[in-house]
Amino acid sequence: MGATLFASTASGLQLSSANYLYTLFWDFSSEQIGMLNMGMIIAVIIAVILAPRLSRRIGKKKAAIFFWSTAALLAPLPYILRVLGWFPENGTAELLPTIVSIQVIDLALFIAAGITISSMFADIVEDSEKTTGRRSEGIFFASRKFLEKSVSGLGIFITSTVLVIVGISETATPGSLDQDTLARWAFVYAPTLIFLYTFAIALVFRYQIDREMHEENLRQLAQQPAP
């Protein structure tokens, strides 16, 4: 639940910042933003294929940590590289496909992490049933979904706070921000995103149910007499 809290806040920050970053940081047109959004379909396909395969290979806990760790490093990378002068300039032909590629991979990783975390929640159901004698999957999954929805507004609040700290007004237009403002934006947005993901990852490390423990839980439950 704690990991979901921080990861959902990070996701809310990314989603609520997206339009500002697309238009003010990258100077993308509405047609280019549409192409970026089309990449979400590809990201979902990649995530659905990747999540179960890696979970079976290295375990759900390690897979979730890998997905979130890589996503946390990849998401702010374009902004840091732009400030350092190691990224395609706005208006160049290379910029859009580069951003699309990075965003598709990053979103796929985040979705794959969500799939894996959901599967880990399912394993908790059996562990709880072994202890309490009751199946409570409705409570677990409803609580998680409620938490995700509750903190979505927190991501929006953090986005507004970042914009205020950086000094970006509501009337800002594409191409109107100087390099110092863009640099401040990158160096506030990127650490904030990494900070939130780091807490999510740290809490996943506390998850104790591995494949052997889950299979043992299932074995014990199968041996219990039917109510």
Image (cartoon, grey):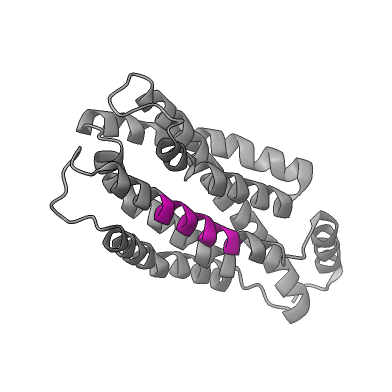
Residue most toward the top?
93
> In the depicted view, which residue is nearer to us: 27 or 202?
27
In this rendering, does residue 95 appear at all? yes
Give the image location of residue 54, x and y in percent. Answer: 70, 40
Residue occupying image coordinates x 35% and y 26%: 96
Residue most toward the bottom?
132
In this rendering, does residue 1 appear at all? no
Horizontal side, residue 142 vs residue 164: left or right: right
Residue occupying image coordinates x 54% and y 64%: 4
- Quarter holding residue 33: top left
How many marks do you count on the picture? Answer: 0
Residue 49 covered by magenta stretch = no
> In the depicted view, which residue is nearer to us: 182 or 40?
182
Horizontal side, residue 68 vs residue 80: left or right: right
Residue 131 versus residue 156 in the image, above or below: below
Residue occupying image coordinates x 59% and y 64%: 199
Q: Which residues are magenta?
A: 187-200
> In the depicted view, which residue is nearer to us: 163 or 110?
163
Give the image location of residue 36, x and y in percent. Answer: 35, 33
- Specify the principal SS of the magenta part: helix
Question: Which quadrant is home to the C terminus?
Answer: bottom right
Residue most toward the front?
180
Give the image location of residue 210, x and y in percent. Answer: 79, 58
Residue 196 covered by magenta stretch = yes
- Quarter holding residue 119: bottom right
Residue 6 versus residue 52 in the image, above or below: below
Question: Which quadrant is home to the N terminus?
Answer: bottom right
Residue occupying image coordinates x 66% and y 58%: 120
Give the image location of residue 137, x and y in percent. Answer: 60, 68
> In the depicted view, which residue is nearer to us: 222 or 182?
182
